Image: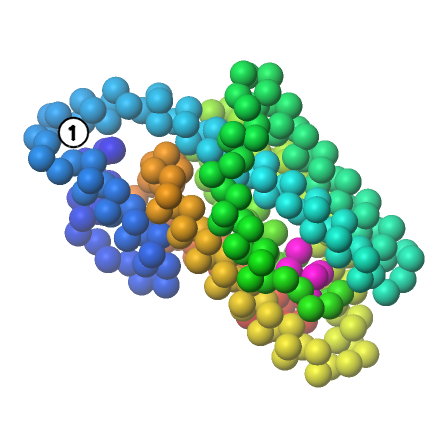
Amino acid sequence: MRPSIQLLLCDVRTATGYPGILDNLRRRDRRCVAGRGADRRVLVADEATTAVSDVATVDLLGLLAYGELTAFERMATDARMAPTLGDKIALASMATGEFSHFMAIHDYLRARGIDPERAMEPFIPALTAFHNLTAPADWLESLVKAYVGDSIAADFYREIAAVLPGEPRELVLSVLADTGHGAFAVEKVRAAIATNPTLAGRLALWGRRLVGEALTQAQRVAADRDALTALLVGVGDLETLAAMFTRIIDAHGERMAALGLSA
């Protein structure tokens, strides 16, 4: 780890509202440098850079692959709650898009001798916990979850993709392409609120709950996977990381406003 980041991780406190993730970066940094001289620190970090980067890339792709697989599964299931046949068809079509994204990552890993299932396995508990804790009660909640929850994750992946090598970076960005669900969700939710304004309060609370659960599971993943934490450190110092999380939350607020909901 670069000494400048080392000093910031040890000495700087953040006011972003996400201390769990950033504190984990500090703890990881202290574990890495405990009992070592400055020269030894830099040497070890340099020797480990390539290996950590490779593991981190596989971790990120495994996490994203399982996210896309569960998105497909969820949308296909949520289509059963669609109030019209047209809505059912639209959501089923978006689900096939998510599965295509999953297969793109699956095939990329397989072509490089990496078992996609093993790459995904470490992230099953966190993503399963998130979906179990945020099971939608109705059609509108399912739309808000897919739009808000999936978009927060996509924003995070895009930010992290900036530190990946060229080929996996392009893969991540292509996989995060919108399947049309955002515009679909905005149209349906705004129409429902226009018909029944009392829905806005319940759905706004639902959106806030989704954010809280997403951040909780993100902390869990960061705590369990040192390689991903190292990738996060690669984004920059703590001020840069704080700015990254601020951008993600600001984008969330804009999406909630697009739905006609308060963040």
Give the image location of residue 241, x and y in percent: 36, 48
Q: Secondary structure at mark 1?
A: helix
How are the residues colored?
rainbow
Image vertical order of residue 205 relative to residue 234, above or below: below
Of the pair 127 and 260, the residue shown nearer to us:
127
Residue 106, quarter of the rendered image? top right
Residue 196, quarter of the rendered image? bottom right
| Residue under the image location 70 percent in, 44 percent down | 72
Give the side of residue 84 with respect to residue 66, left or right. right
Image vertical order of residue 97 relative to residue 165, above or below: below
Which residue is identified by label 1?
Answer: 41
Give the side of residue 24 with respect to residue 115, left or right. left
**Residue 143 is one of the magenta-drawn residues:** yes
Decide if residue 2 is in sight here: yes
Give the side of residue 194 with respect to residue 171, left or right. right
Give the image location of residue 243, x and y in percent: 39, 52
Decide if residue 250 is in sight here: no
Q: Quadrant of the C terminus?
A: bottom right
Query: Overall secondary structure of the magenta stretch?
Result: helix
Of the pair 243 and 115, the residue shown nearer to us:
115
Of the pair 25 and 123, the residue shown nearer to us:
123
| Residue under the image location 85 percent in, 57 percent down | 87
What are the residue bounds of the magenta stretch? 141-146
Type of the residue with mark 1: Arg
Q: Quadrant of the N terminus?
A: top left
- Determine crowd level at label 1: few under 14, some 14-19, many 20+ residues with C-alpha closer than 10 A: some
Of the pair 68 and 256, the residue shown nearer to us:
68
**Residue 83 is one of the magenta-drawn residues:** no
| Residue under the image location 61 percent in, 52 percent down | 150
